[in-house]
Image: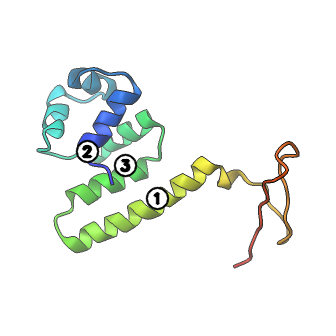
Amino acid sequence: MKTTIEWLNDVKAAHSLTSDYQLSKFLGVTAQCISVSMKGHTFLSDDTAIKVAKALGIDPAIVMASVHYERAKKAPEKDIWRGIFERLGGLAAALVLGLTFIPYAPDASATTFNKEVSNIYIMRSNL
């Protein structure tokens, strides 16, 4: 699971930002906010986590779950946020693979969705 510093560095890298000041302007937050976050003294606010996620083109819930995990002080809280993050991470992986855009198959028989790629089959289970 990524930390606040890692998320901020990912935005810098993704948008070729060379300084924390540029990052602050890009995200629309104060330079002080970025500075204390990059030193590990504070965590992203939910609002900034959303901005980071949008800047990276990912689901804001993934960044927010990661930040809440980092913020949590007690083991049970961390466990809950880790579980949420892992479930969201699996969902994100499915989206990246395009599994949510598979056409509906009316029964459990195999179906192809692209004649040019005839070796990809999708099965639907009624479980």
Residue 30: x, y in percent? 20, 28
Please tell me which of labels 2 and 3 falls first in the chain: 2
Pointer 2: what residue? Answer: 4
Graded by Cα atoms within 10 Å as few (under 14), some (14 to 19) or many (20 or more), the crowding at tag 3 reads many
Q: Which amino acid, by three-letter code, is at mark 2?
A: Thr
- Numbered circle sitting on residue 63: 3
Is 24 situated above or below 105? above
Graded by Cα atoms within 10 Å as few (under 14), some (14 to 19) or many (20 or more), the crowding at tag 2 reads many
Q: Out of 31 and 107, give the one closest to the viewer.
A: 107
Labelled pair 2, 1 in contact (Cβ < 8 Å) = no
- Numbered circle sitting on residue 88: 1
Q: In which quarter of the image is the C terminus?
A: bottom right
Instruction: Judge from the rendering whether residue 16 lies leftward or rightward of residue 112; answer left or right.
Output: left
Graded by Cα atoms within 10 Å as few (under 14), some (14 to 19) or many (20 or more), the crowding at tag 1 reads some
Q: Which amino acid, by three-letter code, is at mark 3?
A: Val
Is 96 situated above or below 86? above
Labelled pair 2, 3 in contact (Cβ < 8 Å) = no
Q: Out of 102 and 45, give the one closest to the viewer.
A: 102
Q: Of helix, strand and loop, which one carries label 1? A: helix
Q: Can residue 76 be seen in this view?
A: yes
Q: What residue appears at the point 32 percent right and 22 percent down from the top-left corner?
A: 17
How far apart, in angstroms, are the residues tagged by discs 2 and 3?
Answer: 9 Å
How far apart, in angstroms, are the residues tagged by discs 3 and 1?
Answer: 10 Å
